[in-house]
Image: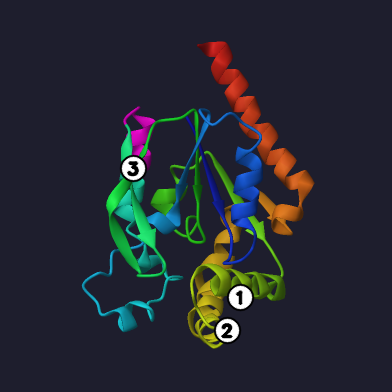
Amino acid sequence: MLIVGIAGGTGCGKTTVVNKVMASFRSGDVALLPQDSYYRDSAHLPLEERQKLNFDHPDSIEWSLLIEHIRELKKGNSVRQPIYSYLTCTRSAETLLVQPHKVVIVEGILILTQQEMRDLLDIKVFVDADPDDRLSRVLRRDLAERGRSAEIVLDRYDRTVKPMHLEFIDPSKRYADIIIPQGGENKVGIRVLTSLIREHLNTSSETV
């Protein structure tokens, strides 16, 4: 099993990169574990307090569960991935069954910040983007998908997103094997990553 980690700041284009890479393979070859599914459940807090949580700090993630799930998948066991809602800032009672695949992509802003997490990754990728581009993408996404006002998005960006990016996320870039500037628009970077994954799949098929 090949474990690929794809990190990068909020709004850098990680999801676009992941989607384009996965579109190059059959659905049975590649599975996705989003870091965002492993945010700690905040159901015990009032909604107003939940919406003020710092989602860009490493402590917001239940790393032990994510790491356990990756290890179980490597053993050939299926796992129950949590389902997290940005609208309520809580985990659903339901879970998503993830079966072992030849390739597992772990995607999220913070995955290269944790050594125990990095040690599980065979390929470490950092998707880079200009801060202004990231902010504009965050604005469009949060207004359209997360029911937030522009004022709330900009306040959160200044209060947590930008400081956490500078403190944790951008420094983790030094651990990357591959850096993809310009996010999903970088066709060459995506082609390189896709080729590495395809090489692994071809090698796995030959050894079966």
List x then y, in percent, for residue 204. Answer: 54, 19
Q: Is residue 87 above or below residue 99?
A: below
**Residue under the point 57% across and 70% down:** 144
What element does badge 3 sit on? helix
Q: Which residues are magenta?
A: 70-77
For the residues bearing labels 3 and 2, Cβ distance under 8 angstroms: no
Neighbours of disc 2 within 10 Å: few (<14), some (14-19), many (20+): some
Q: Is residue 75 magenta?
A: yes
Say if residue 165 shows up in the picture: yes
Q: Which residue is mark 2?
A: 150
Task: Choose the circle earlier in sequence order: 1 or 2.
Answer: 1
The residues tagged by marks 1 and 3 sit, at their Cα atoms, a distance apart of: 32 Å
Q: Which residue is mark 3?
A: 69
Task: Choose the circle earlier in sequence order: 3 or 2.
Answer: 3
Residue type for callout 1: Leu
For the residues bearing labels 1 and 2, Cβ distance under 8 angstroms: yes
Q: Is residue 198 above or below residue 52?
A: above
Residue type for callout 2: Ala
**Residue 54 found in image quarter:** bottom left
Residue type for callout 3: His
* Dominant SS in magenta: helix
Q: Which residue is mark 1?
A: 139
> In the figure, is residue 76 to the left or right of 167?
left
The residues tagged by marks 3 and 2 sit, at their Cα atoms, a distance apart of: 36 Å
Neighbours of disc 1 within 10 Å: few (<14), some (14-19), many (20+): some
